[in-house]
Amino acid sequence: MHNLIIVVFCLGLVLTQAFGSTIEKVKTETYKDIISKAQLLLLQKDRLQAVNILIMAIQKEDPKGLPYSELKKTLNKVAQIFLNENAQSEYELALSIDKTDRKGAIEKLNDVLKIEPQNSQILKNLIAMNLALKKCSQALTQFESLLVVNPLDIQIPFLDIAVSVCFKNTNKYKEQKKKYEVLAQIPLEFWYINDNRIQLPSEERLSEFVFAIDHISKVNPEVLYFKAQSEQTTIKDRNNLTKEYIKRCKLHKNNFMINNYIDPWVCENLGLVQDDEKNNKI
């Protein structure tokens, strides 16, 4: 009996030390340890678990500190890195056929997502393609998946707003504008374009005079399109804007990225503008 008591006592002591050691380890775990854990999980192809531990760590850090910055950088990489070489090849093929066969590109990307689940890069392109085709419900479903994979992705505000524009949900758009317009990464051109797309009352739209005619060489081409439609624009300026819009859109190579943000409908009016120009309607 005595021996049994000693064994139990020793076992308890060992467990106490082990537990204490675990507590100490948790207390002293650095952001670099978290990053190493995430990388190990990624090697094991457990992307979601890697994402979860990074998000939990980020939530505890000061947004202005180095740990926050490094953890977020790692999260972005973990969320979009390809774990399957064949999947990456198929993904690139889907993007290459997008301009000529968008429905085919979407179908291929959905297949790639089965091989490479929870990949934020695939999800963002699927969202943009479905939005471009006005498939709002599909885009919303994929956007919700993106929020799980990387809620801190820099494209989240742009895509969130684009979904509301797609649904023509004016009330939600106004709420989102109040929420997001304080973010430095959202340029004024984005609000000007989408205020017009969702057709806010003129008094609620960002003024077109924010963009001077002689300072629009680098803006999203859709700024040119909406300025050309304005009643405030002279015929001469309208013709110049139209020509510049056509020129810029013909040179635009990236399907959706423009000025570091995703715009599903960039240059969507090119065909219409070209037809109108031919018929001298503009």
Image (cartoon, grey):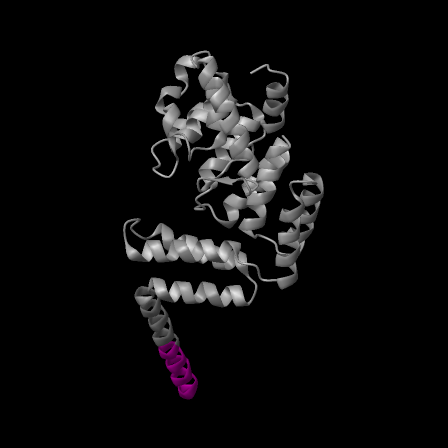
Where the C terminus falls, by quadrant?
top right
Q: Considering only vertical position in the picture, is 214 above or below 42?
A: above
Which sits in the foreground, 23 or 44?
Answer: 44
5 drawn magenta: yes
Q: Residue at x 41, y 19 (%)?
A: 205
Which sits in the foreground, 41 or 191?
Answer: 191
Q: Which residue is drawn at 45% across and 46% down?
A: 153
Where the N terminus falls, by quadrant?
bottom left
Q: Dividing the picture into quarters, in which one does residue 255 lie?
A: top right
Which sits in the foreground, 40 or 244?
Answer: 244
Q: Residue at x 39, y 53 (%)?
A: 72
Q: Considering only vertical position in the picture, is 233 above or below 158?
A: above
Of all residues shown, which one is farthest toward the bottom?
Answer: 3
Q: Quick check: 99 left or right of 164?
A: right
Q: Position of residue 211 (x, y in %)?
A: 37, 25
Q: Position of residue 44 (x, y in %)?
A: 55, 67
Looking at the rendering, the stretch of residues picked out in magenta corresponds to 1-14
